[in-house]
Image (spheres, rainbow, N blue to C red):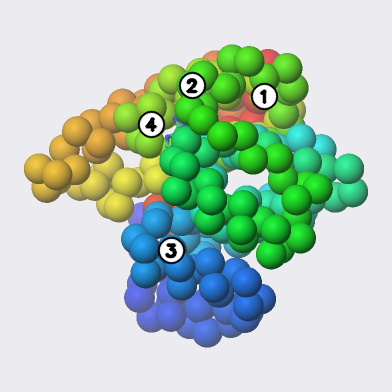
Amino acid sequence: MKKIIYPDQLEYISSFEKKDNALIKKIERYAREHKVPILSKDSSNFLEHLIVITRPKKVLEIGTAVAYSSIKIGRNLSSGGILYTIEKSNDKIKIAIKFINKAKLEDKINLLEGDAQEIMPKLKVKFDFIFLDADKEDYKKLFDLSLSLLKKGGVIFIDNLLWHGFAASKKVPKKYASSTKHIRSFNKMFMKTPSLNTSIMPIGDGIGLGIKIK
Ligand SMILES: C[S@@+](CC[C@H](N)C(=O)[O-])C[C@H]1O[C@@H](n2cnc3c(N)ncnc32)[C@H](O)[C@@H]1O
Protein backbone atom coordinates (compact mmCIF):
# COMPACT_ATOMS: atom_id res chain seq x y z
CA MET A 1 0.00 0.00 0.00
CA LYS A 2 1.25 3.51 -0.82
CA LYS A 3 2.13 5.82 2.04
CA ILE A 4 -0.02 8.94 2.05
CA ILE A 5 1.45 10.79 5.00
CA TYR A 6 4.76 12.54 4.37
CA PRO A 7 6.39 15.43 6.27
CA ASP A 8 4.92 17.89 3.73
CA GLN A 9 1.44 16.56 4.40
CA LEU A 10 1.93 16.75 8.15
CA GLU A 11 3.20 20.33 7.88
CA TYR A 12 0.20 21.22 5.69
CA ILE A 13 -2.24 19.75 8.24
CA SER A 14 -0.53 21.50 11.15
CA SER A 15 -0.89 24.84 9.33
CA PHE A 16 -4.58 24.63 10.29
CA GLU A 17 -3.80 24.09 13.97
CA LYS A 18 -6.06 26.17 16.21
CA LYS A 19 -4.49 28.21 18.99
CA ASP A 20 -5.29 26.72 22.39
CA ASN A 21 -5.94 28.76 25.52
CA ALA A 22 -3.19 30.33 27.63
CA LEU A 23 -3.38 27.71 30.41
CA ILE A 24 -2.96 24.79 28.02
CA LYS A 25 0.02 26.55 26.44
CA LYS A 26 1.46 27.13 29.91
CA ILE A 27 1.14 23.43 30.79
CA GLU A 28 2.74 22.44 27.47
CA ARG A 29 5.65 24.81 28.26
CA TYR A 30 5.94 23.41 31.81
CA ALA A 31 5.97 19.83 30.49
CA ARG A 32 8.64 20.69 27.91
CA GLU A 33 10.87 22.47 30.42
CA HIS A 34 10.51 19.79 33.12
CA LYS A 35 10.58 16.84 30.73
CA VAL A 36 7.13 15.58 31.74
CA PRO A 37 5.75 13.29 29.01
CA ILE A 38 2.26 14.38 27.92
CA LEU A 39 -0.06 13.35 25.10
CA SER A 40 0.91 14.64 21.65
CA LYS A 41 -1.22 17.38 20.13
CA ASP A 42 -2.78 15.00 17.59
CA SER A 43 -3.59 12.38 20.22
CA SER A 44 -5.05 14.91 22.63
CA ASN A 45 -7.19 16.44 19.85
CA PHE A 46 -8.44 12.95 19.00
CA LEU A 47 -9.14 12.26 22.69
CA GLU A 48 -11.12 15.50 23.01
CA HIS A 49 -13.19 14.64 19.93
CA LEU A 50 -13.96 11.19 21.35
CA ILE A 51 -15.07 12.66 24.68
CA VAL A 52 -17.42 15.04 22.85
CA ILE A 53 -18.80 12.26 20.61
CA THR A 54 -19.23 9.56 23.25
CA ARG A 55 -20.46 11.89 26.05
CA PRO A 56 -19.19 9.66 28.89
CA LYS A 57 -20.63 10.24 32.35
CA LYS A 58 -17.72 8.59 34.14
CA VAL A 59 -14.16 8.69 32.84
CA LEU A 60 -11.06 7.11 34.41
CA GLU A 61 -7.54 8.27 33.57
CA ILE A 62 -4.53 6.26 34.76
CA GLY A 63 -1.51 8.60 34.77
CA THR A 64 -2.40 12.25 35.46
CA ALA A 65 1.14 13.68 35.37
CA VAL A 66 0.56 17.46 35.49
CA ALA A 67 -3.10 17.24 34.39
CA TYR A 68 -2.63 18.26 30.74
CA SER A 69 -4.85 15.51 29.37
CA SER A 70 -7.08 15.65 32.49
CA ILE A 71 -7.95 19.27 31.71
CA LYS A 72 -8.53 18.44 28.05
CA ILE A 73 -10.94 15.68 29.09
CA GLY A 74 -12.54 17.71 31.89
CA ARG A 75 -13.31 20.73 29.72
CA ASN A 76 -15.21 18.54 27.23
CA LEU A 77 -17.34 16.57 29.69
CA SER A 78 -21.07 17.05 29.35
CA SER A 79 -23.07 18.18 32.37
CA GLY A 80 -22.90 15.61 35.17
CA GLY A 81 -19.79 14.04 33.69
CA ILE A 82 -16.84 13.36 36.01
CA LEU A 83 -13.20 12.37 35.54
CA TYR A 84 -11.36 10.22 38.08
CA THR A 85 -7.63 10.48 37.47
CA ILE A 86 -4.89 8.53 39.27
CA GLU A 87 -1.31 9.67 39.87
CA LYS A 88 1.39 8.19 42.12
CA SER A 89 4.08 10.89 42.00
CA ASN A 90 3.69 13.41 44.84
CA ASP A 91 5.63 16.10 42.96
CA LYS A 92 3.39 15.80 39.92
CA ILE A 93 0.24 15.71 42.07
CA LYS A 94 1.08 19.14 43.53
CA ILE A 95 1.47 20.68 40.07
CA ALA A 96 -1.61 18.87 38.73
CA ILE A 97 -3.79 20.30 41.55
CA LYS A 98 -2.50 23.79 40.78
CA PHE A 99 -3.38 23.49 37.08
CA ILE A 100 -6.78 21.87 37.73
CA ASN A 101 -7.70 24.75 40.06
CA LYS A 102 -6.50 27.30 37.51
CA ALA A 103 -8.73 25.61 34.92
CA LYS A 104 -11.63 25.83 37.43
CA LEU A 105 -12.31 22.13 36.91
CA GLU A 106 -12.17 21.01 40.58
CA ASP A 107 -15.83 19.94 40.39
CA LYS A 108 -15.29 17.77 37.31
CA ILE A 109 -11.91 16.21 38.16
CA ASN A 110 -11.40 13.87 41.10
CA LEU A 111 -7.65 13.31 41.55
CA LEU A 112 -6.88 10.02 43.29
CA GLU A 113 -3.42 9.97 44.84
CA GLY A 114 -1.44 6.72 44.86
CA ASP A 115 -0.59 3.65 42.81
CA ALA A 116 -3.32 2.70 40.35
CA GLN A 117 -2.64 -0.98 41.02
CA GLU A 118 -3.78 -0.47 44.60
CA ILE A 119 -6.51 2.10 43.95
CA MET A 120 -8.32 0.45 41.01
CA PRO A 121 -9.35 -2.79 42.76
CA LYS A 122 -11.01 -0.67 45.47
CA LEU A 123 -13.07 1.49 43.08
CA LYS A 124 -16.80 0.89 43.32
CA VAL A 125 -17.56 2.86 40.13
CA LYS A 126 -17.85 1.54 36.55
CA PHE A 127 -16.63 3.71 33.70
CA ASP A 128 -17.85 4.66 30.22
CA PHE A 129 -14.37 5.71 29.09
CA ILE A 130 -10.89 4.75 30.34
CA PHE A 131 -7.64 6.40 29.29
CA LEU A 132 -4.52 4.34 30.13
CA ASP A 133 -1.28 6.34 30.10
CA ALA A 134 1.01 5.01 32.86
CA ASP A 135 4.34 3.13 33.12
CA LYS A 136 4.63 0.78 30.16
CA GLU A 137 5.91 -2.08 32.37
CA ASP A 138 2.57 -1.98 34.22
CA TYR A 139 0.33 -1.79 31.13
CA LYS A 140 -0.81 -5.42 31.20
CA LYS A 141 -1.87 -5.34 34.88
CA LEU A 142 -3.49 -1.91 34.56
CA PHE A 143 -5.26 -3.01 31.38
CA ASP A 144 -6.72 -6.09 33.13
CA LEU A 145 -7.91 -3.90 36.00
CA SER A 146 -9.35 -1.43 33.47
CA LEU A 147 -11.35 -4.13 31.69
CA SER A 148 -13.09 -5.07 34.91
CA LEU A 149 -14.05 -1.41 35.47
CA LEU A 150 -15.20 -0.70 31.90
CA LYS A 151 -18.93 -0.84 31.14
CA LYS A 152 -20.19 -2.79 28.13
CA GLY A 153 -20.17 -0.35 25.19
CA GLY A 154 -17.45 1.66 26.94
CA VAL A 155 -14.23 2.83 25.29
CA ILE A 156 -10.62 2.25 26.31
CA PHE A 157 -8.00 4.62 24.88
CA ILE A 158 -4.32 3.68 25.35
CA ASP A 159 -1.31 5.83 24.49
CA ASN A 160 2.19 4.93 23.26
CA LEU A 161 1.48 1.67 21.44
CA LEU A 162 4.03 2.59 18.74
CA TRP A 163 6.49 3.48 21.52
CA HIS A 164 8.46 6.22 19.76
CA GLY A 165 8.52 4.06 16.63
CA PHE A 166 10.48 1.26 18.35
CA ALA A 167 7.52 -1.18 18.51
CA ALA A 168 7.77 -1.56 14.72
CA SER A 169 11.51 -1.05 14.38
CA LYS A 170 14.20 -3.70 13.82
CA LYS A 171 16.80 -1.59 15.60
CA VAL A 172 15.96 -0.75 19.21
CA PRO A 173 18.45 1.14 21.41
CA LYS A 174 19.48 -0.72 24.59
CA LYS A 175 17.79 1.91 26.75
CA TYR A 176 14.41 1.05 25.16
CA ALA A 177 14.86 -2.72 24.83
CA SER A 178 12.88 -3.75 27.89
CA SER A 179 10.03 -1.22 27.48
CA THR A 180 9.75 -2.09 23.76
CA LYS A 181 9.45 -5.77 24.66
CA HIS A 182 6.63 -4.92 27.07
CA ILE A 183 4.79 -2.82 24.49
CA ARG A 184 5.12 -5.46 21.76
CA SER A 185 3.75 -8.19 23.96
CA PHE A 186 1.03 -5.84 25.21
CA ASN A 187 -0.01 -5.02 21.63
CA LYS A 188 -0.34 -8.72 20.73
CA MET A 189 -2.48 -9.36 23.78
CA PHE A 190 -4.54 -6.16 23.31
CA MET A 191 -5.40 -6.93 19.68
CA LYS A 192 -6.63 -10.40 20.65
CA THR A 193 -8.74 -9.40 23.66
CA PRO A 194 -12.06 -11.22 23.06
CA SER A 195 -14.17 -8.72 25.02
CA LEU A 196 -12.98 -5.76 22.93
CA ASN A 197 -13.25 -4.54 19.37
CA THR A 198 -9.71 -3.14 18.97
CA SER A 199 -7.43 -1.21 16.66
CA ILE A 200 -4.11 0.61 16.87
CA MET A 201 -4.19 3.98 15.16
CA PRO A 202 -1.14 5.79 13.77
CA ILE A 203 -1.93 8.97 15.67
CA GLY A 204 0.76 10.60 17.81
CA ASP A 205 2.75 7.80 19.47
CA GLY A 206 0.13 5.17 18.51
CA ILE A 207 -3.31 5.04 20.07
CA GLY A 208 -4.94 1.76 21.01
CA LEU A 209 -8.69 2.02 20.85
CA GLY A 210 -10.97 -0.66 22.21
CA ILE A 211 -14.74 -0.84 22.51
CA LYS A 212 -16.13 -3.32 25.02
CA ILE A 213 -18.45 -5.63 23.14
CA LYS A 214 -19.06 -8.21 25.87
C1 LIG B 1 2.86 9.70 30.37
S1 LIG B 1 2.54 10.40 31.94
C2 LIG B 1 0.84 10.85 31.83
C3 LIG B 1 0.60 12.02 30.94
C4 LIG B 1 -0.81 12.57 30.99
N1 LIG B 1 -1.81 11.54 30.77
C5 LIG B 1 -0.97 13.66 29.93
O1 LIG B 1 -1.08 13.30 28.74
O2 LIG B 1 -0.97 14.83 30.28
C6 LIG B 1 2.47 8.97 32.96
C7 LIG B 1 2.16 9.27 34.42
O3 LIG B 1 1.67 8.08 35.01
C8 LIG B 1 2.12 8.02 36.34
N2 LIG B 1 2.06 6.58 36.70
C9 LIG B 1 2.77 5.57 36.15
N3 LIG B 1 2.40 4.38 36.67
C10 LIG B 1 1.43 4.67 37.61
C11 LIG B 1 0.67 3.87 38.49
N4 LIG B 1 0.82 2.55 38.55
N5 LIG B 1 -0.23 4.50 39.30
C12 LIG B 1 -0.40 5.84 39.25
N6 LIG B 1 0.30 6.65 38.44
C13 LIG B 1 1.20 6.07 37.61
C14 LIG B 1 3.54 8.57 36.27
O4 LIG B 1 3.96 9.03 37.54
C15 LIG B 1 3.38 9.69 35.25
O5 LIG B 1 3.14 10.92 35.85
State left or right for residue 125 relative to residue 207.
right
- Which-is-in-front pick, marks 4 and 2? 2
- N-term-proximal mark, 3 vs 2: 3
The quarter of the displayed image where residue 18 is located: bottom right
- Quick one: label 3 or label 4, which is nearer the N terminus? 3
- Which sits earlier in the primary sequence, circle 4 or circle 2? 2
Residue in the image at 51% along x and 19% along y: 118
- Where, quadrant-wise, is the C terminus in this rendering? top right
Spatial separation of the CA atoms under disc 3 and disc 4: 27 Å
Which residue appears at 39% of the width and 42% of the height?
161
Kind of residue indicated by mark 2: Gln
Mark positioned earlier in the residue sequence (2 or 1) = 2
Residue type, mark 4 in image = Asn
Specify whether tag 2 is near ligand 1 (CB below 8 Å): yes
Q: Where residue 183 sits in the image (x, y, percent)?
A: 32, 34
Q: CA distance from mark 3 to mark 2?
A: 25 Å
Q: Which mark is residue 150?
A: 1
- Residue identified by numbered label 2: 117
User: How would you rate the neighbour count of disc 4 (Cα within 10 Å): few for under 14, some for 14-19, many for 20 or more?
Assistant: some
Q: CA distance from mark 3 to mark 1?
A: 30 Å
Q: Secondary structure at mark 2?
A: helix
Q: Are marks 3 and 1 in contact (CB under 8 Å)?
A: no
Residue 73 spot, x, y in % from top left: 68, 52
Disc 1 is placed on an element classified as strand
Would residue 138 be found to the left or right of residue 16 on screen?
left
Where does label 4 land, which residue? 187
Q: Is 166 positioned to the left or the right of 125 in the image?
A: left
First along the sequence among labels 4 and 1:
1
Comparing labels 3 and 4, the label whose residue is closer to the camera: 3
**Where is mark 3, residue-wise?**
31
Amino acid carrying mark 3 in the image: Ala
